[in-house]
Image (cartoon, helix red, strand yellow):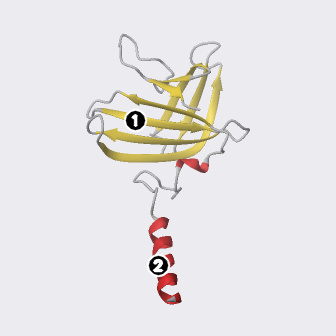
Amino acid sequence: MKKVILFAVACALLAACGNGKTAGNAEGVDSLDSVAADSAVYTGVLPAADVFGIRYRLAVAQDSTNGFSLAEEYLKSENEVGATFSYTGTAEILKGKGEPGKTYYMLKTGDKDNVYNFLVLNDSTLRMVSDDLKEAAGTALNYDLKLQK
């Protein structure tokens, strides 16, 4: 009987080891909870050219590490998720670049061609901006992530 229980526990542990890893998770981080528990978490679905939209979940540590965890879910429809990618790293805080008096987060994912920039609009909203820190001009599309906790 002990062997059966030990075997069941071993199987459960092996199954749990693969959970939470995604295609874009090169570091093998198991979840977005690797950023400190006192993180600010922003979410939103932003427009995309080839899919219904991209759901973002961004957790930014509220301590001196400036760590971040970013998840992207490419939506085939409002409720159906296609590909999922996860990134972690350090958010660089930019002040004095872009528009004067504004603050930006530059999220470097480890791939030099895959950098995310967000303008801090207020205490509860981040807006995705271009590589040159410019907001999308002349569009009614929503590029905002809202604070969840």
Residue positioned most to the front: 1
**From this viewpoint, is residue 129 visible?**
no
The one of 59 and 8 positioned closer to us in this rendering = 8
Tell me if 23 is positioned left or right of 109 in this view.
Answer: left
Q: Are marks 2 and 1 in contact (CB under 8 Å)?
A: no
> For the residue marked with disc 1, what is the amino acid?
Arg
Q: Position of residue 110 (x, y in %)?
A: 52, 47
Q: Residues within 10 Å of mark 1 (few under 14, many from 20)?
A: many
Image quadrant containing the C terminus: top right
115 and 124: which is toward the camera:
124
- Residue 105 in view of the camera: yes
Q: Position of residue 105 (x, y in %)?
A: 58, 29
**In this view, 112 is above or below 145:** below
Compared with 80, 5 (above or below) is below
For the point 65% across and 18% down, the residue is 96
Q: Is residue 26 left or right of residue 140?
A: right
Identify the residue at the far top of this view.
Answer: 138
Query: Residue 103 sits in which quadrant?
Result: top right
Q: Position of residue 113 (x, y in %)?
A: 44, 40
Give the residue at mark 1: 55
Residue on which the image places disc 2 = 8
Choose between 88 and 99: the one closer to the eye. 88
Query: Would residue 135 be found to the left or right of residue 53 on screen?
Result: right
Q: Which residue is at 37% across, 34% downward? A: 54
User: Helix, strand or loop at disc 1?
Assistant: strand
User: Is the residue marked by circle 2 packed among few (<14), some (14-19), or many (20+) residues within 10 Å?
Assistant: few
Distance of mark 2 from mark 1, alpha carbons?
36 Å
- Label 2 or label 1, whichever lies nearer to me, is 2
Quadrant of the image occupied by residue 76: top left
